[in-house]
Amino acid sequence: MSTLNSAKLYGRVALLRRQVLLQQLIRRAIAGALAVAAFIVSAGLATYALFLAIRVPLGDVGATLSIAGLYLLSALLFLTYTLREPHSPELQALEEMEAAALDTVTADTQNMVQLFNAAGHRIENLGSSLTLGVGILSALRKLLASR
């Protein structure tokens, strides 16, 4: 595979992986915002329930506390979802594909570097041969001129 194709493949795989990560990040951010909102509501309702408990011995307190409990439960569920690490086979496969594509790009790049090094050595050898040839011709010319 050529270096350009390897780089394109790596770019596509890396972009796809980043898109999946961004989608998961957005989902988790929304769930976190919902958890914060539910916590605020449950704290408000718990405060209201405490107020009612102090004001009236029991009446509306049971209903208000049960609603506050539901909001608190939903807040804890959203928070648990938000803090959970995503374990998706799709994301794991994309991570492996990205690593493989990066290895391919690295190997192709190393092959190109080796080719350029080999070409540099050949040019250096050619330069040495040319210098040697010019030196020999100069020596032969001097020998012929001295006769």
Image (tube, helix red, strand yellow):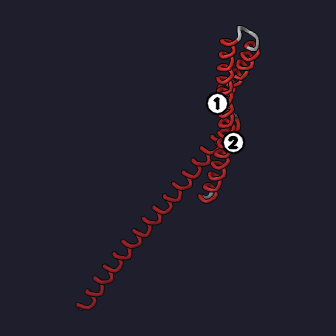
Q: Earlier in the sequence, mark 2 or mark 1?
A: 2
Residue at 65% x, 15% y is 50
The span from disc 2 to disc 1 (Cα, nearest Å) is: 20 Å
Residue at 73% x, 17% y is 64
Quarter of the picture holding the C terminus:
bottom left
- Looking at this view, name the residue that lies furthest to the top: 57
- Looking at this view, name the residue that lies furthest to the left: 146
- The amino acid at mark 1 is Val
Q: Secondary structure at mark 2?
A: helix
Give the number of the disc on residue 36.
1
Q: Quadrant of residue 20?
A: top right
Relative height, residue 23 to residue 3 (above, below) = above
Q: Quadrant of residue 6?
A: bottom right
Relative height, residue 97 to residue 8 (above, below) = above
Image x and y of residue 92, in percent = 66, 37
Q: Quadrant of residue 24?
A: top right
Q: Secondary structure at mark 1?
A: helix
Image x and y of residue 12, in percent = 66, 52
- The amino acid at mark 2 is Gln
Give the number of the disc on residue 23.
2
Q: Of tags 2 and 1, which is closer to the observer?
A: 1
- Towards the viewer: 111 or 18: 18
- Towards the viewer: 138 or 96: 96
Relative height, residue 66 to residue 27 (above, below) = above
